[in-house]
Structure formats: C-alpha cells, structure tokens
Amino acid sequence: MISLGLSLFPEFEPHPLLRSGHLQTIWSALWTVRRHRYRAAQHLVTLDSQEKLVLHDDCPTSWSSTAPCVLLLHGLGGSYASTYMVRLVEKLNQRGIRVFRMDMRGCGAGHALAVSPGHAGRSEDVRACVARIRETCPSAPLRIAGFSLGGNLVLKMLGEQLHPPGHIDRVLAVSPPIDLELCAANIRQYRFYDRAFVRSLCAQIRRRRRTLPQLRRLPITPQPRSIQEFDDRITAPLAGFRDSLDYYQQASAAPLLGRIDVPTTILAAADDPLIPVRMFSRPDLSPRVQVHVTRHGGHLGYIAAASDDPDRRWLDWRVVDWVCG
C-alpha cells in the first residue's frame, strides 16, 4: 500500500484468482448482485436550465432526523441502479443510514428529463442535490461518496466553493478521474475499455432519442471509436464546449484540489487500468485532502481474499466504515 498522509484504511488483499487490476475491474463489473425491491422515494430536482434529474431517497425506518445521511454519485454510463450503488444502499440502510442516489442528467430514471448531457463538470447538479437534501433533512450531517466520474464531480464542487454548505461534514472520492485529458489518453491504450464505454454511452443516447426528438440528429453513426471521439462529437457540442480538450480542461477537478476546505478522502488503486495513479501525487493538495492508494484493486474492483468482512466486497465495507465512523 502507498499512502499519502495517514493510513486511512486496512490493507486490501485481493482475491487469489484476481490479482491484476484488469481482472479486478472486469470481474467486479460482471459480478452482479441479487435483485432488490426498489423502495426509494423520488425527488425531481430542477436545474438552472429548467432541466431535471432524479434523486432517489432510501430512508430506513430506524433513521432519525439528526442521524447522518449520505449522497452517492455514480460513474460514467452508470445510474442509481449500478451494482455498487445498489449494494451500498442495502448495507447502509441496514445500519440506519439514509441514502440518496443522484442520477446524472439523462441517466437512470431521468433519462428523458434533460436534453443536455451529464458529464464530469456538472458540479452545479451536485450543488442542486445537496440543496434539496438540506431542505429534506435540515438537521442531518451530510456525507458524499462519489465513484469514478462522480468522484471528480464532488471534488470539483468542493474546490469551486470557498464556503461549502456547512452540513457537508466529509467527502469520499473513489478512483476519481481528476485529470480527464490524461485519463482519455490512458484509456486509448486499452481498446476493450474504450469501446465498452462508447457502446454503453451510444446505447444510452439511442434510448433517450425515443422520447427526446432534439437528440435524433446526434452524429452517432458511424459509432465513435473512442471516448475522446464521443466527447468531441456529442458531449462537447451538447454541453457548450469547443471540443473534447476544452471540456477536459474545464471539467477536471485537479486544479481545484488545493482549495478544498472539507475533510476529504481520495481512494485509488495503483493498478487501476483507467485512472493513472500518478495524477494524485500533487504538491498543491489542500491539507484537508488525504489520498490513500492501494497496490491492488483495479477500477472500482476491490474483490478481496477471505477476511473479517462479511463478504468479499472490500470497497463496500470501507465505504460503510467511513460513513458510519
């Protein structure tokens, strides 16, 4: 384990058959969870553009108004129904924690509620959800956990606000792509991941075009060959950027990490095939930000050898410990 600052988590020991970052990443994505009955209340959050997104609210009966609640932010191509989001709702609800899951614009239950796309720079959307949670739970401390793209979103939001909302008492960003240009260049080495993300994003666009005529002229034929080409042809023009590089420069959280004034933890793996770990070795980190880098784990993988945890999902239990601690 390489740790910048204090050792924040117990050492991760990978499953003996899944020691590489690629195996951790792929197997974790393929290993689905049993279906859980959807019980969340839905809040429609109206954004400055009058577009909307959906905030899913899972409140256990044991939750009290002064107990913590947590906001979970999914990654690229995900939604409230991503397997890690569903697992964490179940585990946190069992401990009496109220959980909110934000669908980024155009994702999940809000696929037809916004024309402009969700992307790594939509920190204003996180602020809108934080404000809604404050209205709903005015006495509860709020903890935010962002995964992959969601991690960049929350870090960017914190860095932009000189005086962040006082009810945010801690933040966790897991495998956040804080330098989007570097991540786009890195992923081009691995065509399997690049093409998988593009297929997922294009499928999402096709679903949205059925109910949003404004999207029917989007140039997704021929299909983009990389995430960067997707961002050049679709994300950038829809979101008002000149091109993908303009988007990456404006949306990356890295330049803002020195301004964060909320206790923040970044968790990453040295063998993550998507997120180059060197981007976290920054001299300009705020003293409020701590970085914990494990040797193994892949990208949102962390499938562990047998341990004292109730199951092999090491990441889930570290999030639970962090929220409940």
Image (spheres, grey):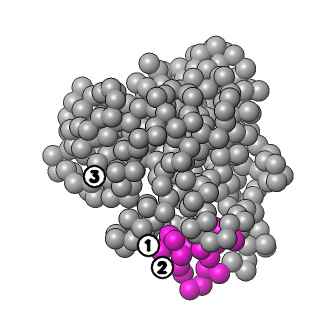
- Quarter of the picture containing the C terminus is top left
State which tag comes first along the sequence, 2 or 1.
1
Mark 1 and mark 3 residues within 8 Å of each other at the beta carbon: no
Q: Say if residue 286 shows up in the picture.
A: yes
Q: Say if residue 86 shows up in the picture.
A: no
What element does badge 3 sit on?
loop
Residue 249's spot in the image, x, y percent? 57, 59
What element does badge 2 sit on?
loop
Residue nearest the viewer, comparing 156 with 36: 156
Q: Is residue 148 above or below residue 164?
A: below
Residue positioned 60% across, 55% down in the render: 251
Q: Quadrant of residue 206?
A: bottom right
Residue 20's spot in the image, x, y percent? 22, 54
- The answer to whether residue 280 is left or right of residue 119 is left
Distance (Cα) linking label 1 and label 3: 20 Å
Nearer the viewer's eye, disc 1 or disc 3? 3
What element does badge 1 sit on?
helix
Mark 2 and mark 1 residues within 8 Å of each other at the beta carbon: yes
Amino acid type shown at disc 1: Arg
Amino acid type shown at disc 3: Asp
Residue furthest right as drawn: 50
Residue 158's spot in the image, x, y percent? 60, 37
Residue positioned 59% across, 74% down in the render: 232
Residue nearest the viewer, comparing 229 with 290: 290
State which tag comes first along the sequence, 3 or 2.
2
Residue stretch in magenta? 219-237
Residue positioned 69% across, 46% down in the render: 125
* Label number found at residue 195: 1
Which residue in the structure is indicated by mark 3?
A: 271
Which residue in the structure is indicated by mark 2?
A: 225
Q: Is residue 154 above or below residue 136?
A: below
